[in-house]
Image (spheres, rainbow, N blue to C red):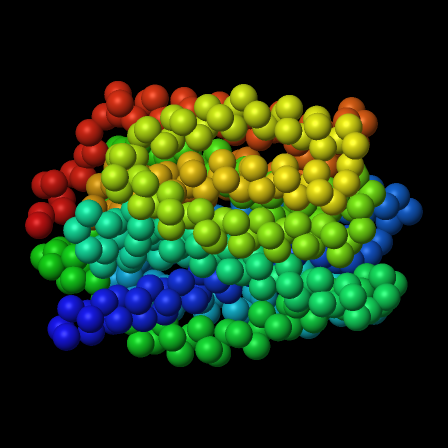
Amino acid sequence: MAAVQNRRAKVMTVLRVAGGNFLEMYDFMVFGYYASGIARTYFPSESEFASLMLSLMTFGAGFLMRPLGAILLGAYVDHHGRRRGLLLTLGLMSVGTLGIAVTPGYASIGLAAPVLVVAGRLLQGFSAGVELGGVSVYLAEIATSGRRGFYVSWQSASQQVAVVFAAFLGVTLASALPPEQMADWGWRIPILAGCLIIPVVFMLRRALAETQEFLARRQHPTAREVLRSVAVNWRLVAIGLLMVTMTTVSFYMITAFTPTFGKSALNLAATDNLLVTLCVGLSNLFWLPVMGTLADRLGRRPPLVFFAGLALLTAYPAMAWLAGQPSFPRLLAVELWLSFLYAGYNGAMVVCLIEIMPPQVRTAGFSMAYSLATAIFGGFTPAICSYLIHRTGNPAMPGLWLSFAALCGLAAAFALGRRPEAKPIAAEFPG
């Protein structure tokens, strides 16, 4: 009986932690899904491409704040605790989301409209800089022995629920509203729906307990000590950056960029593109826990090498096959294949990134590596892919961008065997 109760308590804890992560990713996905409508409302231009690029660059701008949030909020989490940090990031994310949802369009308030939207996006990015790290570290520290990969996989799995929910809502709205109304004001509905979820998620997170591993430490580092330790362990952060590049580029390519890619590059129906994205979210949700369990059994490095290598070999050929004769079945097949590769790599990557970081600065170190990769590569994936297609006229070019990311992931996987030992500066962080 005690074992059953303990298992139920663990499940509820995972749900409470993952709820905020769901909201964070939902807000980011919605912005990417409705980039065209947002571009029309806040970034009007005579050139449709220029307007779309401004919207996609705003999507990417949120990621530029992630490294700052990673180090500042990461230091807060490592010093004050996982629970308090998760509540803080949720509050900041909520303010940014609400700001975007209620800001009038350019036609109503002029230049103030895009300024407010960018500000809301930057605040979202600042909080997201440590959200993934905080959730991942929390799950790792409550995991049962030998199942850390499985537990941590639910950080990424909760994001897939957000992808599915956002895509399902998008399909419903696309079926109910004419394209003109969807572009004018319909895109606000999913963002407002995210605002309605906030109180529920906040109540769930308030019920969280602090992790025993954090409470067991006799001393917690200050912000200055966290900065110093991250700097000393810069080689580990660099390896982590390369690892995350594969994950973040593939994830945003198969989720946030899919509706824009299907519409702008392949000329497929908006409903079909959102259905594919929904299927990708379900595929990710299925594969991530499976791959997390696989990483527990095989170790971290073998899946990293295998799936990065497979992505390097197949990404461009798959996209070229799709571009040769665009259709809903081909788009679905390619995206599901890339989903399998993403989940296979990510299932081992997240837990591996946690384990190579010094425990005393685990959240800040993880978040810094993750945020830098997302800010430099992943967050701008929709904009980069759109630019490459526009420049070359080749819809398969996103496959080359993913191949580059896979090469980074493969290099990181090999570097793991020669990585330096973590330097926690034990003299400064006793216990």
Residue 222 visible in the snapshot = no
Examine the image and state in which quarter residue 377 appears.
Answer: top right
- Total numbered badges shown on the rendered structure: 0
386 is higher (above) or lower (below) than 136: above
**Residue extending furthest toward the right:** 46
Q: Residue at x 11, y 59 (%)?
A: 216
Q: Position of residue 334 (x, y in %)?
A: 63, 37
Q: Position of residue 94 (x, y in %)?
A: 52, 69
Residue 153 visible in the snapshot = yes
Asked if residue 57 lies left or right of residue 176, the reply is left
Q: Position of residue 206 (x, y in %)?
A: 34, 76
Q: Residue at x 18, y 39 (%)?
A: 424
251 is higher (above) or lower (below) than 412: below
Q: Residue at x 46, y 52 (%)?
A: 286
Q: Position of residue 138 (x, y in %)?
A: 29, 57
Quadrant the N terminus occupies:
bottom left
Asked if residue 342 lies left or right of residue 87, the reply is right
Asked if residue 238 lies left or right of residue 390, the reply is left
157 is higher (above) or lower (below) than 64: below
Q: Residue at x 46, y 69 (%)?
A: 91
- The answer to which of 102 and 342 lies nearer the viewer is 342
